[in-house]
Image (cartoon, rainbow, N blue to C red):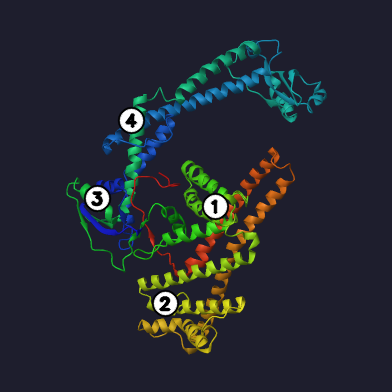
Amino acid sequence: MGMSKMRPVSLYGPSDKTQATLRLLAQLGTFHPDTESVPPQEQNLQDNPYEPLYTAAMSTLEELGRGGALPDKTEDFLLEEVKETVEELRGRAAQLTKKKSELTASIHMYEQAAGQVKHLFGLGATLNELFSVKYLKVRFGRLPKESYPRLAYYEDKDFNFMYYDFDGNYYWGVYFTPADEAAETDAIFESLYFERVWVPEFVQGTPEEALENIEKKLAQLKAEEKELESGAGAVSGQEAARLRLMAAWLAENDRVYGMRQYAVILRTTFLISGYVPQEDWPALQKAVEGLDGVKVKAGEPPKKSAKPPVKLKNNWFTRPFEMYVSMYGLPAYGQFDPTNFVALTYSLLFGIMFGDVGQGILLGLVGYFFMYRKKHLAVGNILARCSVSSVFFGLIYGSVFGFEHALAPLYQALGMGGHAPLSPMENIDFVLVASIGVGVAILVVSILLGVYTRLRRGDVGGALFSASGLAGLVFYLSLAALVLQMMANIALPFVGSLPFVLLCVLAPGLLIYFSEPLSALLRGEKPEEGFGGMVLNGFFEMFDALLSFASNTMSFLRVGGFVLAHAGMMSVVFTLAAMTAQGSAAYWLVMAVGNVFVMCLEGLFVAIQVLRLEYYEMFSRFYEADGIPYAPLTLQQAPGEAA
């Protein structure tokens, strides 16, 4: 457990097999390309034959009205076959688009004509008669109501304006003028802000007859438009389905072509280097046998200087907590995986802070069945595991949905006098002191892990002299013992004596003070700073160590604080419920709503606060997240990635 062992592999063969090899690796989904020793070869991405064809195929499908998600599975095609099909159907789609444009323009023209003709109702004559007059000019349009009274100023002019509709703002009408005076009359009406309406030639008969004919024509045109939108007139359903399969094939090959950046391609050969998990090596070896001329070779186990990717591998209980480790950053390959430590401490602290049998069970059910199984939220699986700890500490506190006497028969049967082992509100001092004690224990374990991880990294100086090394451990425990003796007035043997101060406080303090130059000497290097620099840096190192020890320890007071906060919030719920009749429907409604509110609010706060303790108080002592995430080549599109 911890992380999968990685096996370095190299694939090589004829350069014309590069695409097929990358496609196979992506189908297997286990090969992680080595970008550390082989930087991406951007020049290999030039002249991609699939990308323009894919773009053309998708635009053609849109023009044919056959857009949408592509099939998950596709067939194998020849590139030339796909190119011919796309070009042919693209030509048909272009013709279809042209017809659509012409049809849309016609529909727009007839719709405008319909709007104009509606204002001609009441004209009292046919349009044919008006347009057939030889010596008169006829102008249709609308005149603003503010301009209409001003027509009286032009009574001496040779024109006549008739309106047949008024919409509240405009007089819709027509004016007649002799042909030889049309220019002057048009100028007058232009000064009156007359807006001319051009009646198309196809508008014939009375306005009512013309509108009826226009609406019939519009219905015909829209039916044709609907038929064109389906693309039925351009391609058959079989042709469209085949084009969709080809588009999916092009999208897949376009993605594979983008993976050519991980290959070193010479004139006639290619080389691809990377890593596969040890357990997936046999499957890769067998799959490559099907590629003619392509060979695969396994390398030696990764050296310390190498940077293989990290794939965490833990048991079913701790696996969900990998999410929290990944959020912070993965460990370097071959280093300590803190997932098990996080699973243990997170569940423990969550249970202490959220100790309630009923709410713990309900939290577990909601977390697993609703958040994880239905909504696919990984945090739901974590809450399901934390609920076990919540139920356990709920038994210690004797709390079931806030009822502190519900488990009295159980405690009576166990010979405990009907009382819970620990009632938080009756033992406030103990709860707060115990939370500090839990914090000290966890910090000691974190420092020990820091010693272990530094030794694995070869940092002997850091393991011995740093604040998170052996010197820091002795210094921290010594200070904790002194504080305990003073605060609790407990006489501890040896603690506080002169030898204790010299050996357990002063000596490790000096080691921490001069940790950097001592570590350099241990590595056989000469300290970079002079004596003044060492003194100044040591002062800040020591100040930071004291401050971090104090702040990290006091941070665990929040554990006891949330234990008391839970009991306090539930007492408020009981107070509100007591305002109603005991045992009534209103009483149980208040209890139910109060429990849900407390569970949601405190569950959120506790989850965040425990994660904060993990990241800031514990990880800072031993964890360096400098690992490379395992990201194998795959045909699956990453979330948010364009095809």
Judge by depth and name the residue closer to the eye, 336 or 7.
336
> On residue 284, which mark appears?
3
- Percent position (x, y) of residue 584? 70, 39
Can residue 560 be seen in the rendering of this structure? yes
Say left or right for 189 vs 302. Answer: right
If you read the primary sequence from the N terminus, does the residue marked by circle 4 or circle 1 appear first? 4
The CA span between labels 1 and 3 is 61 Å
Say left or right for 27 vs 574. Answer: left
Q: Tell me where residue 559 sits by quadrant.
A: bottom right
Judge by depth and name the residue closer to the eye, 525 or 404.
404
Look at 59% across and 66% down and name the residue there.
557
Judge by depth and name the residue closer to the eye, 448 or 540.
448
Disc 3: CA contacts within 10 A as few (<14), some (14-19) or many (>=20):
some
Disc 2: CA contacts within 10 A as few (<14), some (14-19) or many (>=20):
many
Q: Nearer the viewer, mark 4 or mark 1?
A: 1
Inspect the image, locate mark 4, and give the three-letter code of the amino acid beneath it.
Answer: Arg
> On residue 462, which mark appears?
2
Q: Determine whether label 4 and label 2 are within 8 Å by CB.
A: no
